[in-house]
Amino acid sequence: MTFINYVAREINCKIVYYGPGLGGKTTNLKYVYDITNPENKGKLISLATETERTLFFDFLPLDLGQIRGFSTRFHLYTVPGQVFYDASRKLILKGADGIVFVADSQEERLDANLESVSNLQQNLKEQGFELARMPYVLQLNKRDLPNTMPADHLKKLLLVKGEPVFEAVATKGAGVLETLKAIARQVLIELRKSA
Amino acid sequence: MSASQIALSESDFQRIKSVLRAMQQELDSELVLLIHRSGQQIASDGPAVDLDLTSLSSLSAASLAATDGLAQIVGEKEFSVLFQQGRRRSIHISSLDNQFCLVLLFGERVSPGLVRWKVKKASGGLAQMLQEHQRKTGSGDSNSRMFTDDEIEKLFGQ
């Protein structure tokens, strides 16, 4: 849900990072947090287990700067990727303005990627939304690992609607900001369409 | 299509603020915070507005959503109130019109029962105001959302 406050001159948007467990969603947020100036970010909240698996969500509020005198505030959320946390994923998806799918490029995670994309579509449908009509970006993460699938092959299998695709190594920050900028750009363009 | 939008004009914002302020003063609460169920902060009032309201909003919405999930598992439509009692401060989170939540932060001098009663009493008016706002179309200045491609690109160059 985009919230526009004409008094405070703020545009607030919600972006959700979705994808299979251990795919690098939290790592994306941690990298963004680490490289952002303190005045442009809030606290990074991680509701995780003691082994650092996301239990409920991670949350990072980010100020991307001003446009037409409005501060653009993006609230970044991750969902827990593990299959059995579906109820939590549905809660976090509520009110999302844009979605980043973080795919794990390793061959043995292909089924987990496919299951997660399907789960995303199903959960959005339950809330009355279609992925094909929402701002959406695909990130192929872990491109530095030896057992990754060729990017073109992975794209063929995971693309939903010709969305922008970014190859990434989130642990090193490669592709992380490009992904974030692409989804933020789409959300703002969507907001313009509704003006 | 974006999930949904709320655009608050100055007059809408001031009306909501005045209701929150009245509630804050009547209960002598430290904070009254109105948030959307998606975790976005809408408006707030009270001496504790210096707290990290962005995080508080996100976590309150998530807590209430999780509580709703619990309700459904045990066959209830919703648990509309969530109350966390601390030694010095307590938090009362209540559902408002299925789309919003009201968060009250109050100290040990205020009785939780009184908070529950007053919130219930004031919530009806606030919910009605929010419903009226949502029925209105074209609130705010849509011209300010007509960003050009250049303006969007410039944002990412900052």
Image: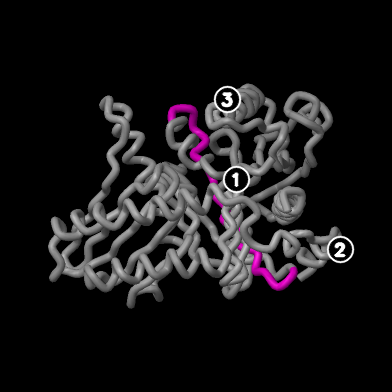
Q: CA distance from mark 2 to mark 3?
A: 36 Å
Tell me the residue that label 1 is attached to: B4
Q: Which labelled disc corresponds to residue A122?
A: 3
Disc 2 crowd, CA 10 A, few/some/many (<14, 14-19, 20+) = few
- Residue type for callout 1: Ser
- Residue type for callout 3: Gln
Residue A14 visible in the displayed image: no
Whether discs 1 and 2 lie on one chain: the answer is yes
What residue sits 49% from the left and 64% below the top? A43
Whether discs 3 and 1 lie on one chain: the answer is no
Q: Secondary structure at mark 3?
A: helix
Residue A178 % position (x, y): 76, 53
What residue sits 59% from the left and 39% below the top? A18
Using the image as rendered, state which of residue A2 and residue A63 is in the foreground: A2
Instruction: Report the chain holding disc 2.
Output: B
Please check the rendered image and state whether residue A71 is part of the magenta-colored stretch, yes or no.
Answer: yes
Q: Secondary structure at mark 1?
A: loop
Magenta segment, which residues?
A68-84
